Image (spheres, rainbow, N blue to C red):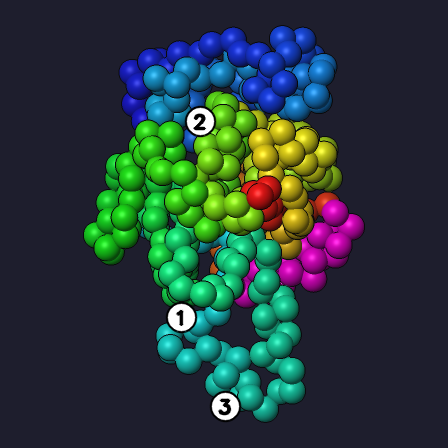
């Protein structure tokens, strides 16, 4: 992003997007830790509902300037960063099914147990056809997974560049916002939004639109950073998931439950994801601040975009322990549209 584009970002004062209260307390001020946009950005906590949000925030007309061309989720990496790809990089045969792997009892089961980060969720297709929508589909990796599981998948993506990838693969992708897509009532059996809701200026407005286009009893699954976790308390302004000024909302499980209930959903489960990528990225941010001329800090930050399988497997036991005590750095939420 060039300096002119950076200077063109405009900010506005906003009431709490969840309860509308104008009463708030300053919580912290931080910089852009990932793409070095100039300036400092403030988080506040609502006195009414306790929700944490960015204020002042970028205006709707200029918020796109907060996302540089090298914004990691918009790059076609071929796989979601938080997922472990269960295949060998050389052979199409998974390593745990190789001749040596078959000789080790329980290796395949152990591998899947370690690799399951609970970062995403796909309901089983019991009867066909079933329609699914992914909001913020980026380059279409999850759309491919939905198609492979038997879903008729559609996407919404605000950025035209990333959206061109799934469009070339034959997916129906609307370039714009969910509201501008203007889907008919009860169009979908499931709606997914992975690491999207925290980017929205008015999340309750979007959730009401999702509730409208979702079948009664349909599944709504999404993920967000967990502002209540130990990582955020330990790393403070260096927390990788802070991601100012792109993350406008910062959720805790109680606030999520209230928001979903207010918009016509019932919570099925809130899962604490089993990965430590935030810890790796936060360590990198802290090291880069302390030792700006050293490469290790940036290397750790870059690792979070394309983590290696073996390192994720090595970190999995600790990640699972933290998830068990409800201290995961990201949350996967599974909700149902109330009939």
Which secondary structure class fits the magenta region best? helix
Above or below residue 219? Residue 199 is above
Horizontally, residue 227 falls left or right of residue 137, namely right
Q: Residues within 10 Å of mark 1 (few under 14, many from 20)?
A: few
Q: Which residues are magenta?
A: 309-326
**Circle nearer the viewer, 1 or 2:** 1
Q: Nearer the viewer, residue 106 or 219?
A: 219
Horizontally, residue 85 falls left or right of residue 113, namely left
Q: Earlier in the sequence, mark 3 or mark 1?
A: 1
Per the image, the residue denoted by label 3 is 99
Q: Which mark is residue 89?
A: 1
Q: Residue furthest front?
A: 339
Above or below residue 85? Residue 40 is above
Q: Residues within 10 Å of mark 2 (few under 14, many from 20)?
A: few
Q: Residue furthest right?
A: 325
Q: Marks 1 and 2, how far apart in space?
A: 33 Å
- Asked if residue 312 lies in the magenta stretch, the reply is yes
Label pair 3/1, CB-CB below 8 angstroms: no
Residue 103 visible to an observer of this rendering: yes
Per the image, the residue denoted by label 2 is 36
């Amino acid at each position: 992003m060039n300096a002119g584009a950076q200077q063109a970002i405009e900010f506005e004062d906003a009431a709490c997007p969840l309860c509308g209260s104008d009463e708030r307390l300053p919580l912290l001020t931080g910089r852009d830790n990932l793409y070095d946009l100039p300036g400092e950005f403030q988080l506040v906590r609502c006195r009414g509902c306790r929700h944490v949000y960015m204020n002042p925030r970028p205006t709707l007309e200029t918020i796109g300037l907060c996302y540089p061309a090298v914004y990691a989720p918009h790059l076609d990496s071929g796989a979601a960063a938080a997922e472990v790809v269960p295949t060998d990089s050389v052979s199409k045969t998974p390593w745990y099914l190789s001749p040596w792997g078959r000789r080790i009892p329980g290796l395949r089961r152990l591998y899947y147990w370690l690799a399951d980060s609970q970062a995403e969720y796909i309901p089983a297709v019991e009867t066909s056809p079933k329609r699914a929508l992914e909001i913020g589909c980026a380059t279409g990796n999850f759309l491919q997974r939905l198609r492979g599981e038997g879903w008729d998948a559609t996407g919404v993506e605000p950025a035209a560049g990333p959206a061109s990838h799934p469009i070339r693969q034959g997916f129906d992708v609307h370039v714009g916002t969910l509201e501008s897509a203007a889907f008919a009532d009860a169009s979908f059996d499931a709606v997914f939004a992975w690491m999207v809701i925290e980017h929205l200026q008015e999340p309750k407005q979007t959730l009401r639109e999702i509730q409208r286009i979702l079948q009664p009893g349909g599944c709504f699954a999404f993920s967000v950073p967990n502002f209540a976790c130990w990582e955020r308390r330990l790393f403070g302004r260096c927390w990788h998931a802070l991601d100012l000024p792109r993350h406008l909302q910062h959720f805790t499980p109680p606030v999520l439950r209230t928001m979903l209930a207010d918009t016509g959903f019932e919570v099925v489960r809130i899962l604490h994801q089993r990965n430590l990528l935030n810890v790796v990225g936060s360590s990198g941010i802290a090291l880069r601040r302390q030792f700006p001329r050293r490469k290790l800090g940036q290397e750790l930050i870059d690792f979070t975009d394309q983590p290696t399988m073996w390192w994720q497997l090595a970190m999995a036991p600790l990640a699972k322990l933290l998830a068990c005590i409800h201290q995961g750095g990201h949350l996967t939420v599974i909700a149902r549209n109330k009939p």
